[in-house]
Amino acid sequence: MRSSNDPHPAHSPIPDPVQPDGSGEVKTMTDIINDIVAQIDQIIFWLRVTVYLVLSICIVWLIGFVRRNLGLDAHSIELRRIRRILEGQSSDK
């Protein structure tokens, strides 16, 4: 048999939503909707940051790809310089 002071009665009602800080205040429907909107805004912000980051990486990769294929990178320039030196040595022989 349960006493009237029992913190867990047999048929306890569904608890009302309360503030996460433990203040015990009941949240209104407006507060709950505002929290959901704030969470959606946060998700949209991080998705935007992620998209910008991915696009930035793609642009940097594309610039490097074009430079390599046009022969404008440091290795291609060095190879052309070495080729000129070797051709100059072979024509001297």
Image (cartoon, helix red, strand yellow):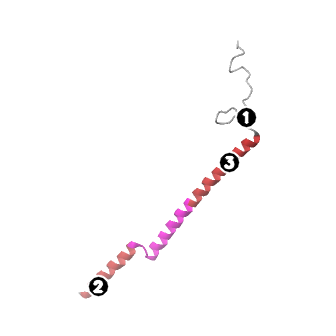
Q: Point out the frontmost of discs 1 and 3.
A: 1
Q: In this view, does 44 lie above or below 80?
A: above
Span of residues in magenta: 53-74
Q: Where is residue 28 in the image (x, y as percent from the top left)?
A: 75, 39
The three-letter amino acid code for the residue at tag 1 is Val
Is 61 left or right of 36, judged from the image as shown?
left
Q: Position of residue 53 (x, y in %)?
A: 55, 59
Which image quadrant for residue 25? top right
Q: Position of residue 40 (x, y in %)?
A: 67, 49
The mark nearer the N terminus, 3 or 2, is 3
What quarter of the picture does the C terminus occupy?
bottom left
The mark nearer the N terminus, 1 or 2, is 1
Q: Residue 59 in magenta?
A: yes
- Do tag 1 and tag 3 residues touch (Cβ < 8 Å)? no
Which residue is situated farthest in the bottom direction here?
92
Which one is nearer the viewer's eye here, 71 or 44?
44
Kindly report the secondary structure that dominates the magenta region of the rendered protein: helix
